Amino acid sequence: MNTDIAAIPTRHWQSLPDGRVQCDVCPRHCRLHEGQRGLCFVRGRDRNGVELYTYGRSSGFCVDPIEKKPLNHFLPGSSVLSFGTAGCNLACKFCQNWDMSKSREMDTLADAASPGELAATARRLGCDSVAFTYNDPTVFLEYAIDVAEACREAGVRSVAVTAGYICPEPREEFFRAIDAANVDLKAFTERFYRHVCGAELAPVLETLVYLRRETSVWLEITTLLIPGENDSDAELDGMTRWIAAELGPDVPLHFTAFHPDWKMRDKPRTPPSTLTRARGIAMANGLRYVYTGNVRDRAGGSTCCHACGALLIERDGYDLGRWGLTPEGACAECGTKAAGVFAAQPGHWGSRRLPVHLHRA
C-alpha cells in the first residue's frame, strides 16, 4: 500500500464534550475517536482534528464530453477533464462507481496532481472545464476547492457532479468556486434515501434550492430510475411538480437507466419505456428540458425550443448534430432565449474518451 497519501488538516469540524470530534462537512456528522475514520473513509480523526487523506491524489484522469456528466446546457460539445478520488458519504446499494466510491484501498489513488498542475493540464488539452466526478467531491472538499480556484485563475471552469449531501457552511464555501453542477436527486421519498442510500432527502432538496436561488452555478439534475424503487407515476409526478415550483421550469432534468450493480444485482435494467414515461410526466408538469440517458434516444437526448418547438441541439448519444442556436444562445427560428451557458459555436469533442496520466505514484 502507498504510504505517501497526502493528509491535510480540514476546517469543518468541532470538539465534543465527550472527547470525540465531529466532522461537519455532511449531515452524517460522524463523531470520531482518535484514529477513527468517517463513513466516507477518507476523512478521519488525527490527534485533535479531522484530516483529509486523499489531497492531491486521484483514481484517474480522463477527458470526456461534457454531456457525459451529464450537462446538456453547459458549453455543449466541449471537453472536460474528469477525475475523482476515493470514498463517498452515501451508501447507495446501486452505486455504479463502487470500485472507487467504496474503496478502502488507497492504492486505487495511483495518479497525483497539484491543483495548479490540473489547471495547466486542462488548458494544455483544450478542455473548457474540469469535473469532480466518479465519487462525490464533498468528501475531498478542500482539494476540490483548491483545484477550482486554480482553474478559475487559468480560465478553466469547474463542474461538480454530486449528491448534494452537504452541510450549509461547507456548501457555501464549495459552490462559491464552482461554475456548474449536476446534482443526483436519487429519489423523492425518505424511505428510498434511508433504506437504499443510508441518507436523508431533506438536505439534498436544501442544496438544490440553495444552488438555484442563491448562486450563479449552472444547475442540472439527474435521477437514476430503478424499477420498482423510485419509478412510480406518483413519485415522478411529485418530484417534477416540486422541481417546477421550487426551482423553476428551466432546470434540465435527466432520467437515466439503471443497470444491476454493487448490492442491487437482483433488480432488472430500466426499460426505455420507463424513461419515456418519466420524461412525459415531467414535461406535462411544466419542465422545459427533460432528457433520457444511458439509452440511445435521439428525441430524448435532443434540446428543443420551449416556445416554438424548433430543434436547438440535436444529440445522438454524446455526438452533436444540428445546431439551432444563435451566437447569443437564442432559438434561430423564433428568437427565444434558451436557458444555459452556451459558447457562440458548439464544441466538437464528440463521444471520445481520452485517459490521461499526470504522474504515476
Image (tube, rainbow, N blue to C red):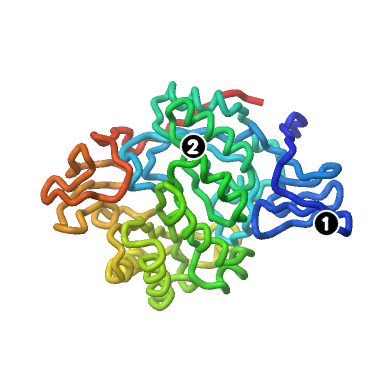
The label on residue 16 is 1
Q: Image quadrant of residue 212? A: bottom left
Q: Nearer the viewer, residue 277 or 284?
A: 284
Q: Nearer the viewer, residue 305 or 315?
A: 305
Q: Of helix, strand and loop, which one carries label 1?
A: loop
The label on residue 6 is none
Earlier residue among tags 2 and 1: 1
Q: Which residue is mark 2?
A: 82
Residue at 70% across, 47% down: 12
Q: As shown in the figure, which amino acid type bears the numbered disc 1? A: Leu
> Residue 180 appears at what percent x and percent y?
43, 44
Residue at 87% across, 58% down: 17
> Residue 157 appears at what percent x and percent y?
44, 35
351 to the left or right of 260? left
88 to the left or right of 281? right
Q: As shown in the figure, which amino acid type bears the numbered disc 2? A: Ser
Split into 4 quadrants, where in the image is the N terminus? top right
Comparing labels 2 and 1, the label whose residue is closer to the camera: 1
Residue at 57% across, 40% down: 84
> Residue 261 appears at what percent x and percent y?
54, 57
Q: Is residue 90 above or below residue 146?
A: below
Q: Of helix, strand and loop, which one carries label 2?
A: strand
